[in-house]
Amino acid sequence: MRARTVLLVAAAVPVTVAAYAAVLKAGHWQLYADRHRITLSPHPRRSCSDCRGAGGWWVGGANPEMEACGCWSERRELRIRLLPVPAWPDEPPF
């Protein structure tokens, strides 16, 4: 019975990971995870008629800058905090 459970779990893990990868790709999300946070951030859509997947366009003038396209910039970034980030030391150790 125990071996059967282990085999089912071992088979379920790759299937679950593949399903999550497909959902993230279809929804144009990027997953980032470390011990401090898990972040889902939006990405530009290749089918966008404005930016065609580039994420924006350059605005000319004296100080050219990139204007972000609404296909990704108006979507929320989702973040889950896990462990606090340690404080940066004010002075180097002696």
Image (cartoon, helix red, strand yellow):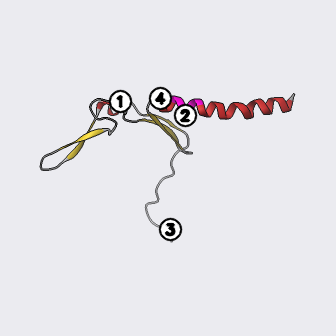
> Which amino acid is tagged 4?
Ala
Residue highlighted by disc 4: 26
How dense is the environment of label 3, judged by Cα within 10 Å: few (below 14), some, or many (20 and up)? Answer: few
Residue highlighted by disc 1: 47
| SS label for mark 2 | helix
Residue 80 at x, y = what percent?
A: 51, 35
Residue highlighted by disc 2: 21
Q: Earlier in the sequence, mark 3 or mark 4?
A: 4
Picture quadrant of residue 56: top left
Label 2 close to label 4 by CB (< 8 Å) = no
- Tell me the residue at 51%/72% (across/down): 94
Q: Is residue 94 above or below residue 3?
A: below
Nearer the observer: mark 4 or 1; the answer is: 1
Residue 15 at x, y = what percent?
A: 65, 31
- Calculate the distance from the C-alpha at mark 3 to the C-alpha at mark 4: 48 Å
Nearer the observer: mark 1 or 3; the answer is: 1
How dense is the environment of label 2, judged by Cα within 10 Å: few (below 14), some, or many (20 and up)? Answer: some
Residue highlighted by disc 3: 93
- Tell me the residue at 32%/30% (across/down): 48
Left-right relation of 6 to 66: right
- Calculate the distance from the C-alpha at mark 2 to the C-alpha at mark 3: 43 Å
